[in-house]
Image: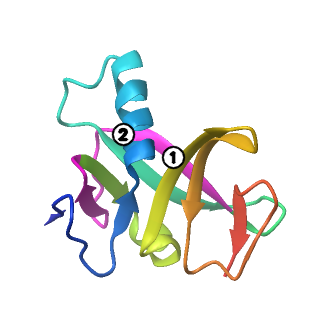
C-alpha cells in the first residue's frame, strides 16, 4: 500500500482534495460505514458517456487481486489495474457551487472532457 502524508505525494497515485475528503467522510457516515476500516473508495473507468469513457466511484470493502491501493489524506482509494491506467495521477475534487454540484476528476491523462465533467477520452 502506498501511504501519503498530507503534504507528500508519490508519483503515479490517485489523490483527493480536502473538499472531496470532507464529502466522502460525510457520505460514509450517512451510509454507516465510517467506523469500518475495511471500506474504501473504488474509482473505476467504464465505457460510455459523450466522450467515450466515464468515471464511476463507489464504496467497496473487497479488494481484488490486481487492485491498486492508495491512501491520501486518510482516505483509501482503490482502482482496478485497467482503470488505474486511465486515472493515474488524477485528483478527485468536490464542488458544491453554482456551476455544478458533485465529484469532479482532474485527470491529466484526459485529452478531451465533456462539458458535464463525467466523461472523457484519452
Residue designated by label 1: 57
Q: Residue at x 47, y 78 (%)?
A: 85
**Is 75 situated above or below 47?**
above
What is the quadrant of residue 15 in the picture?
Answer: bottom left
What is the number of the mark on residue 60?
2
- Rendering coords of residue 114 (x, y %): 80, 64
Residue 10 appears at what percent x and percent y?
Answer: 24, 76
Question: Where is residue 30 drawn, in percent x and y?
Answer: 41, 17
Does residue 63 appear to the left or right of 115 in the view shown? Answer: left
Q: Which residues are magenta?
A: 54-74
Which residue sits at x=25%, y=72%?
A: 9
Label 1 vs label 2, nearer the camera: 1
Q: Is residue 113 magenta?
A: no
Quarter residue 88 falls in = bottom left
Quarter of the image with the N terminus in it: bottom left
How many angstroms separate mark 1 from mark 2 (CA)? 9 Å
Location of the C terminus (image quadrant):
bottom right
**Farthest front residue?**
98
Amino acid at each position: 500500500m502506498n501511504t501519503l502524508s498530507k503534504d507528500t505525494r508519490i508519483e503515479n497515485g490517485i489523490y483527493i482534495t480536502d473538499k472531496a475528503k470532507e464529502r466522502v467522510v460525510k457520505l460514509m457516515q450517512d451510509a454507516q460505514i465510517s467506523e469500518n476500516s475495511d471500506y474504501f473508495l473504488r474509482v473505476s473507468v467504464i465505457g460510455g458517456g459523450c466522450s467515450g469513457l466515464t468515471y464511476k466511484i463507489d464504496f467497496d470493502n473487497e479488494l481484488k487481486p490486481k487492485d491498486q491501493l492508495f491512501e491520501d489524506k486518510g482516505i483509501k482509494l482503490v482502482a482496478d489495474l485497467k482503470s488505474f491506467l486511465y486515472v493515474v495521477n488524477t485528483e478527485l475534487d468536490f464542488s458544491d457551487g453554482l456551476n455544478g454540484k458533485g465529484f469532479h476528476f482532474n485527470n491529466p491523462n484526459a485529452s478531451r472532457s465533456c462539458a458535464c465533467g463525467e466523461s472523457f477520452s484519452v
